Image (tube, rainbow, N blue to C red):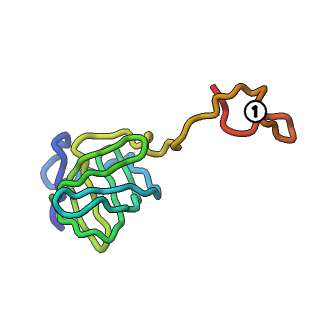
């Protein structure tokens, strides 16, 4: 196996592959653009960390390709393809992100006061808690 591309902020001892301990397994969709190769392609992200992601998609990418991933709540993140294997590929981000932001739900909280929100059978407000 060849050594994957490592972003400039990583440092490692020779022969070791850095593995992010804070990798989250998840299932979400994102759009990936590969400049000069294709239009935006919808991919399934299977795991995500501050330094990169693994995605599934029927897209032709090669190790070292520059990619731009549109992550919800984060926006456009640039990186390079670190590895490819049978419909999957890994991306090493150029700069770290906060993966917890990607997991946050999209939308706004219900900001109405509790006294005008609908109540459940026990008299508790229905919907997200307002702060």
Does 123 appear above or below 84? above
Q: Which residue is at the far left?
A: 14
Pinpoint residue 47: horizontal percent, then vertical percent. 39, 56
Q: Which residue is at the far front?
A: 39
Please tell me which residue lies in front, 100 or 43.
43
Pinpoint residue 15: horizontal percent, then vertical percent. 15, 55
Pinpoint residue 104: horizontal percent, then vertical percent. 50, 42
Q: Considering the image in quadrants, where does the C terminus appear?
A: top right
Image side of residue 105 versus residue 12, left or right: right
Residue beneath the point at 54% across and 40% down = 107
Pinpoint residue 67: horizontal percent, then vertical percent. 23, 54
As helix, strand or loop, the secondary structure at mark 1 comes to loop
Residue beneath the point at 47% across and 45% down = 103
Q: Considering the image in quadrants, where does the N terminus appear?
A: bottom left
Please tell me which residue lies in front, 88 or 14.
88
Q: Quadrant of residue 102?
A: top left
Image side of residue 48 versus residue 108, left or right: left
Q: Quadrant of residue 122?
A: top right
Which residue is under mark 1? Answer: 117
Image side of residue 105 versus residue 113, left or right: left
Image side of residue 64 versus residue 91, left or right: left
Residue beneath the point at 43% across and 51% down = 24
Residue beneath the point at 39% across and 50% down = 23
Please tell me which residue lies in front, 90 or 22.
90
Does 58 appear above or below 78? below
Does 33 appear above or below 12? below
Disc 1 crowd, CA 10 A, few/some/many (<14, 14-19, 20+): some
Does 68 appear above or below 11? below
User: How many numbered marks are there?
Assistant: 1
């Amino acid at each position: 196996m060849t050594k994957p591309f490592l972003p400039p902020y990583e440092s490692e001892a020779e022969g070791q592959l850095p593995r992010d301990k804070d990798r989250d397994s998840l299932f979400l969709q994102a759009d990936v653009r590969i400049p000069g190769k294709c239009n935006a392609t919808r991919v399934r992200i299977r795991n995500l960390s501050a330094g990169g992601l693994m995605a599934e998609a029927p897209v032709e990418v090669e190790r070292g390709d520059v990619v731009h991933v549109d992550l919800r709540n984060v926006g456009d993140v640039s990186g390079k393809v670190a590895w490819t294997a049978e419909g999957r590929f890994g991306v090493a981000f150029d700069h770290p992100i906060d993966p917890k932001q990607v997991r946050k739900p999209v939308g706004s909280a219900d900001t109405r006061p509790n006294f005008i929100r609908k109540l459940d059978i026990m008299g508790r407000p229905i919907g997200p808690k307002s702060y």
